[in-house]
Amino acid sequence: MVITMIYLDYSATTPVEEQVLESYLKVCKNFIGNPNSLHRLGIEAKALIEEATNQVASLLKVKPSEIIYTSGSSESNNTVIKGVAFKYQNRGKHIITTALEHSSVIAPLQYLTNLGFEVDFVKVNENGEIDLEHFKSLLRDDTILVTIASVSSELGVIQPIEKIGKLLKSYPKCFFHVDMTQSIGKIEVSLEDVDFISFSAHKFYGMKGVGVLIKKEGISFEPLIHGGKSTTVYRSGTPALALIVSVAKALRLSLENLEQKKEQVKALNVYLREELKQIDGIHINSSEKAIPHILNFSVPGIKPETLQHALEEKDIFISTQTACSKSGSSSSAVMAVTHNEKYAMSSLRVSISYKTTKQELSFFMDTLKEVLERLSFTNERNENSKGN
């Protein structure tokens, strides 16, 4: 088997499935009308959106009226966090989250703190799961929002979303937002007892530039974008018809044989984890309870960007933290779990898929060992030269 390129960054984005691309192109060519237009072409386009929306709703077991299309998870997360904060600030200005969240959650929360909102971070245990007792202690009468990802994008930590949702039933004034970007299309998820759900199509072999925000019925918030007719009052702008149709296709395909795909990934994760354990100096940050698609590890003493680019020279592609993190920054997620600055400063993420092969991982491991040996030798030589 000849391996030309090894892609191990599926949690950053996935390649577009051929059938999804075909659907997108077909709609682009054959449905030119604006879904907001009242003429026949507009009506045909609107009917196609409704068909796609009904399919998405059926697959996720929600109501079509609860689906809002966005440009991606970053917009969905910002829309919920700012929208709930501005709409319900008369009830309180307290929000709860974790240190494991994506930057599109942390950044708007930081923005809100400048406006007088208070954000508390719930503690996590050695596996990265939230401390439910600490979480309970943080809940207050003026808590208006809890925002916790179902799966951490860096570590793959799976949070007890159902337990959190049930706890929050005792706090009817508090809304529960879950970023499901790293779980939908990969593992079984439950949307019960959750008020808002965010996800992006490009995480499960869909097109880039389209995401979904699910807002449960009976809830309102302040829109992020105002002006212009659309599929909903909560997100203005001309509906991206072809992208919306492609979401439905990508979601349907990703959910087919989901358990079988997950078991394939699990077997690959076990192999990779065992191989990494054989290398001195490597610390695995992802718990064995994490989603099998993500495996985060650290190599203290070697800059993650240096190792990443050394592997890139061999056409092997992995991540340092997440694709949206600042380059050279310490991982707050790894720090929260390991409490070790060296691990937080040197973390790398390998993210795999059911499309990944064992041969690819074997080649990756062989190359990683070669690169680490070379970089360690270079570092040792540099240290010796300094000593002289």
Image (spheres, rainbow, N blue to C red):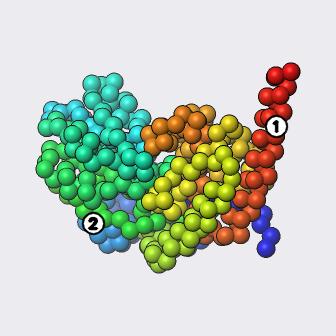
Which disc, if any, is residue 62? 2
The amino acid type found where label 1 is placed reads Thr
- Relative to the observer, which residue lies in front, 18 or 123? 123
Residue 23 seen in this snapshot: no
- Relative to the observer, which residue lies in front, 353 or 358? 358
Q: Which image quadrant is residue 18 in? A: bottom right
Q: Is residue 380 above or below residue 146?
A: above
* Labelled pair 2, 1 in contact (Cβ < 8 Å): no
Q: Secondary structure at mark 2?
A: loop
Which disc, if any, is residue 241? none
Q: Residue at x 36, y 54 (%)?
A: 159
Quadrant where the image shows the C terminus: top right
The amino acid type found where label 2 is placed reads Val
Q: Is residue 322 above or below residue 109?
A: below
Q: Is residue 42 above or below residue 229?
A: below
Q: Position of residue 123 (x, y in %)?
A: 34, 41
Per the image, the residue denoted by label 1 is 378
Residue 273 seen in this snapshot: yes
- Relative to the observer, which residue lies in front, 259 or 191? 259
Q: Which image quadrant is residue 101 in? A: top left
Q: Position of residue 81 (x, y in %)?
A: 31, 41
Disc 2 from disc 1: Cα separation: 56 Å
Q: Secondary structure at mark 1?
A: helix
Q: Residue at x 59, y 48 (%)?
A: 283
Please give left or right for residue 174 compared with residue 236 in the image.
left
Q: Residue at x 67, y 70 (%)?
A: 358
For mark 2, does the 10 Å Cα neighbourhood hold few (<14), some (14 to 19), or many (20 or more) residues?
some
- Relative to the observer, which residue lies in front, 290 or 275? 275
Q: Residue at x 27, y 48 (%)?
A: 132
Q: Position of residue 209 (x, y in %)?
A: 50, 53
Pick whichever of labels 2 and 1 is earlier in the sequence. 2
